[in-house]
């Protein structure tokens, strides 16, 4: 009996550890049949040493169910289908154990990352070409996306300058790569911090005002240094931070719409106020977020002292309301920055939250 108990405990631990790779769902459905040694766990067969028995007559008593209940798990029983449902993360000991396993897994990931970076410090890669201000291609065809920054896209102000400066820094040269927690983005590009000699390229582009900080957790290793570089570029009005003389100010952003933001697009908006003494022709002005989503102002004049709200959804433009007509929410609830540019691409104002 003791041997059977130990076997079941090991089985439970094994089942629980298998659920770690399936997101938040740790629910396991176990199906058994009287007299049958095959147990089905989420429809996958597992052979048991003993078959379920009737104790008392008329009810199936499954060893794994018995032990699970004894350990305090939430156990459901369907007598008609003879199905047991065990909520594995409700067992205190197993919950404690899986937390340990998750921590050990994170520690292992960190050690692997440190090892990769140590190797990266000793290995260099030849840059075949520069794609734009924050993306390059190596000799073997690997595309590298710079971590922590966002350079202007094609057609945007300072795109050519950022691309050319990146070309000057790395094209045709040997670079070192340093990785963070997440190594690939959704497009399959490798995410890295790039170094040429003693130059930290990601940081250099930000410091020269040719890119802005674009931090996406968990890759936050150099956020403080990048922030300091961006502050330097702002203070010296370098590159994209060159100030316009136009007296407009972003006075408020309603970024968290009631309900689901994507279903209530006009529940989020940006308010812009004319602080000057004369009306301002805003035709061709651009409102942009950190992810480079852009709103191009239509023919529009904002009177002195008045404000206009730019809604993310669709609607009819008026003297104090404009509509982005985006198909999704623009402003991130966990933090973002709005950039307002004049028709020449000069920065008028920013608003961060």
Image: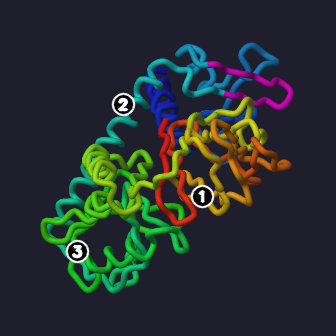
Residue on which the image places disc 1: 286
- Number of callouts in the render? 3
Query: What x and y, as percent, mark residue 171?
Result: 29, 82
The span shown in magenta is: 74-85
Q: Residue furthest front?
A: 277
Asked if the stretch drawn in magenta spans residue 118, the answer is no
Neighbour class for label 2 at 10 Å: few (<14), some, many (≥20)? few
Question: Residue visible at 81% across and 46% down?
Answer: 318
Residue on which the image places disc 2: 100
How many angstroms separate mark 3 from mark 1 (CA)? 35 Å
Query: What x and y, as percent, mark residue 95?
Result: 47, 25
Figure check: 273 above or below 45: above
Foreground of the two, 193 or 24 = 193
**Which numbered disc, 3 or 2, marks the residue that appears first in the sequence?**
2
**Which numbered disc, 3 or 1, marks the residue that appears first in the sequence?**
3
Figure check: 313 above or below 293: above
């Amino acid at each position: 009996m003791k041997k059977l108990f130990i076997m079941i405990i090991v089985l439970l631990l094994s089942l629980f550890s298998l659920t770690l790779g399936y997101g938040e769902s740790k629910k396991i459905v176990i199906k058994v049949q009287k007299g049958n040694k095959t147990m089905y766990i989420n429809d996958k067969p597992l052979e048991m040493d003993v078959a379920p028995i009737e104790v008392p007559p008329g009810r199936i008593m499954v060893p794994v169910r018995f032990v699970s209940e004894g350990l305090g798990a939430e156990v459901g029983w369907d007598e008609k289908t003879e199905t047991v449902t065990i909520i594995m993360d409700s067992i205190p000991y197993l919950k404690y154990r899986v937390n340990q396993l998750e921590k050990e897994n994170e520690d292992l990931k960190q050690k692997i990352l440190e090892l990769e970076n140590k190797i990266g410090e000793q290995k260099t890669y030849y840059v075949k070409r520069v794609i734009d201000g924050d993306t390059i291609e190596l000799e073997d065809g690997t595309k590298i996306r710079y971590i922590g920054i966002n350079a202007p896209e094609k057609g945007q102000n300072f795109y050519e300058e950022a691309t050319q400066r990146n070309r000057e820094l790395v094209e045709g040269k040997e670079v070192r790569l340093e990785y963070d927690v997440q190594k690939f983005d959704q497009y399959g590009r490798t995410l890295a911090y790039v170094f040429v000699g003693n130059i930290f390229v990601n940081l250099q582009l930000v410091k020269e005002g040719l890119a802005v900080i674009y931090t996406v957790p968990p890759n936050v290793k150099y956020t403080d240094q990048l922030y300091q570089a961006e502050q330097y570029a702002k203070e010296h009005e370098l590159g994209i931070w060159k100030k316009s003389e136009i007296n407009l100010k972003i006075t408020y952003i309603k970024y968290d719409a009631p309900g689901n933001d994507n279903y209530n697009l006009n529940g989020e908006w940006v308010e812009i106020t004319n602080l000057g003494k004369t009306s301002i022709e805003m035709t061709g002005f651009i409102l942009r977020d950190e992810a480079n989503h852009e709103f191009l102002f239509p023919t529009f004049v904002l009177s002195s002292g008045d404000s206009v709200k730019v809604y993310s959804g669709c609607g009819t433009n008026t003297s104090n309301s404009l509509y982005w007509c985006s198909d999704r929410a623009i402003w991130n609830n966990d933090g973002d920055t709005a950039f307002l540019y004049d028709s020449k691409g000069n920065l008028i104002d920013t608003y961060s939250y």
